[in-house]
Amino acid sequence: MSTSEPNSSSSDSNLSFSERHYFSSYDHFGIHEEMLKDETRTLSYRNAIYQNSHMFRGKVVLDVGCGTGILSMFAARAGAKHVIGVDMSTIIDMAKKIVELNGLSDKITLLKGKMEEVVLPFDKVDIIISEWMGYFLLYESMLDTVLYARDRYLVSDGLIFPDRATLHLAGIEDGDYKEEKIGFWSDVYGFDYSPFQEVALTEPLVDTVDMKAVVTDAAQILDLDLYTVQKTDLEFSKDFYIKSRRNDFIHAFIAWFDIEFSKCHKPIRFSTGPHAKYTHWKQTVFYTRDTLTINHGEVITGRLTNKPNAVNPRDLDITIDYEFQPEDDESRRSSASCQYKMC
C-alpha cells in the first residue's frame, strides 16, 4: 500500500500525530522494497494494465498513493495519454527521479499532496489505479481516499483498477505458536506476567499461516465493489458460519482478502490467503481465549464487527462473537465475545 496525502509544511501542520506517523512510515526505502518484491501484488497490477492496454490507450489515469511510481509507469507504458500520481510521503521525490530516468516525465505528473487538496492538471480522469489495501484489508488502508478521488474526478463510465475486494474468515489450529505468544506470559523466568496475556489476546497477529493449519471452511465477511461502496460501508457487522473439515482443535480465527480486476478482458485476481502464494499482507490471526475441540462437520457460528477507532480512524476496533454448541458434548461448548484492536 502506498500513500496519498500531503507532505508540504502547510499541510503537515494540519495533520494529527497518528497521521504524521502513518505517512512518514512510507518515507522509508524498506517498505517500498518489500512491496515491489511482492510479485503476487506487483505482477497482478502489471498484468491487469499491460494485458488491457486497449483500455488505457489515450486515457487520463490517476494513481492514488503512487509511492515509487511503479503503477504510474505501467499505465504510461500501456499507452495512457497522461498519468497523474499523487502521494504524501517524501518517497515521491525519489519517484520523480525514477520517472525521469525511465524517460516518462512527459507522460507522468507526480504531485506531492493530499488527494483532497492537490490541484490536478485535468478536471476529470478516465481510470483510477491504486494499491490501497492494508492488513486485514482495511487496517491503515487508503480506501476512503480512493473513494474521494472516485467521486470527485472519475468520469461517469470510468474504470477503477482493482475494483473488487472480499474479506474471508476461517478457524485454525495453532497451539504451538499460541503457547509461545500467549502462554509465555504465565511464567516469565519464574514470575507471573499473566496481565500481559490480556494485552496479547487483544492484538491481532500479522503472520503467514500454513494451509495445513486451516481447520474449517472459509466464510466471506465483506464484499466491496469500488464503483458503489461508500465510506460508511467500511464500518460493518457480518454473521459467519464455518464448518470443520476434520477432527482438530481451534486456537484462533484467521482473516485474509482477495482482490479482483473484474473489468479486464480476462479478469485478474489474487489472494492473500494461506492457500495462495506469499504476499507482504500475509494473514491476520485473532487468538481466542478458549481452545475449541471440534469434530468433522461441526459448525461455529458468529458475527464479526469492524469499525474505525474513534481516536485514530486508521486503526481498527474488531469484535468477534462466536458460539460453538456441539449437541453431543456439553463439555466442549464455548461462546465468547473477543475484542481486538489493530494499531
Image: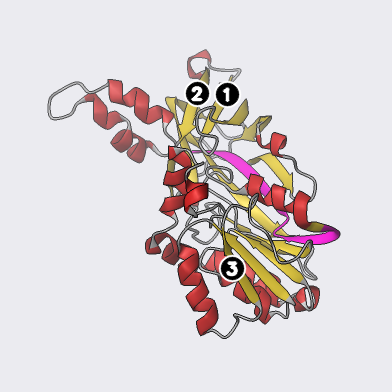
Q: Quadrant of residue 243?
A: top right
Q: Quadrant of the C terminus?
A: top left
Q: Quadrant of the N terminus?
A: bottom right
Which amino acid, by three-letter code, is at mark 1?
Tyr
Q: Nearer the viewer, residue 19 or 251?
A: 19
Residue 322: image tag: 1
The furthest residue to the front: 10
Pointers 1 and 2 in contact (C-beta within 8 Å): yes
Q: Residue at left 32%, top 25%?
A: 197
Q: How many marks?
A: 3
Q: Quadrant of residue 120?
A: bottom right
Magenta residues?
155-172
In the image, is residue 281 above or below residue 263?
A: above
Q: Residue at left 68%, top 71%?
A: 83
Among the two numbered marks 2 and 3 on one chain, the one whose residue lies closer to the N terminus: 3
At mark 1, the secondary structure is: strand
- The answer to whether residue 184 is left or right of residue 29 is left
Q: Position of residue 322 (x, y in %)?
A: 57, 23
Q: CA distance from mark 2 to mark 3?
A: 44 Å
Q: Residues within 10 Å of mark 3 (few under 14, many from 20)?
A: many
Q: Position of residue 18 (x, y in %)?
A: 45, 39
Residue 338: image tag: 2
